[in-house]
Amino acid sequence: MLRRHATIVCVLVASASVAYAAQHAVGQKGRLFSPGAIHVKAGDAVVFKNDDSVTHHIYSSTKGREFELENTGPGQSLKHVFSTRGRVEVRCGLHPGMRLVVTVD
């Protein structure tokens, strides 16, 4: 006599809460950053989109939060991740009047 055995398979599905970093857009037009100030969370990225007709050079010399991006021509975008909490002043190396304040929470 043949006996069939039933096999019970138990599958445990674990779900974890995964936090994804946000992305924020900052435009560059009229030799200004738009907006001129933003709040982001640590780990968020800011995408700098050059909507201007001239090249820009984005950097920060804020102590402990320094960074420098490549030159961006019209229509180009560059991204920077802000990982350290605090206030970061962002400037354009080609246009001294361009200033952006990023507050990282």
Image (cartoon, rainbow, N blue to C red):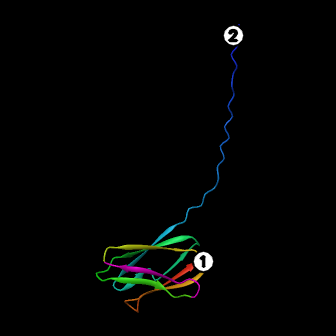
- Is 48 positioned to the left or the right of 104 in the image? left
Task: Calculate the distance from the C-alpha at mark 2 to the C-alpha at mark 1.
Answer: 68 Å
Q: Position of residue 86 (x, y in %)?
A: 60, 82
Task: Choose top left, top right, bottom left or bottom right for residue 104.
Answer: bottom right
Name the front one of labels 2 and 1: 2
Q: Which residue is mark 1?
A: 84
Q: Which amino acid, by three-letter code, is at mark 2?
A: Leu
Residue drawn at x 30%, y 77% is 74
Q: Position of residue 95 (x, y in %)?
A: 37, 90
- Segment tinted magenta in the rendering: 63-73
Outermost residue on the bottom side: it is: 96
Q: Secondary structure at mark 2?
A: loop
Within 10 Å of disc 2 (Cα), the crowding (few <14, some 14-19, many 20+) is: few
Q: Which residue is mark 2?
A: 2
- Is 46 positioned to the left or the right of 41 in the image? left
- Is 60 positioned to the left or the right of 14 in the image? left
Image quarter (top left, top right, bottom left or bottom right) of the N terminus: top right
Outermost residue on the left side: it is: 53
Residue drawn at x 57%, y 88% is 63
Q: Position of residue 76 (x, y in %)?
A: 34, 73
Image quarter (top left, top right, bottom left or bottom right) of the C terminus: bottom right
Residue drawn at x 51%, y 88% is 61
Give the answer, above or below, for where 23 lies relative to 50.
above
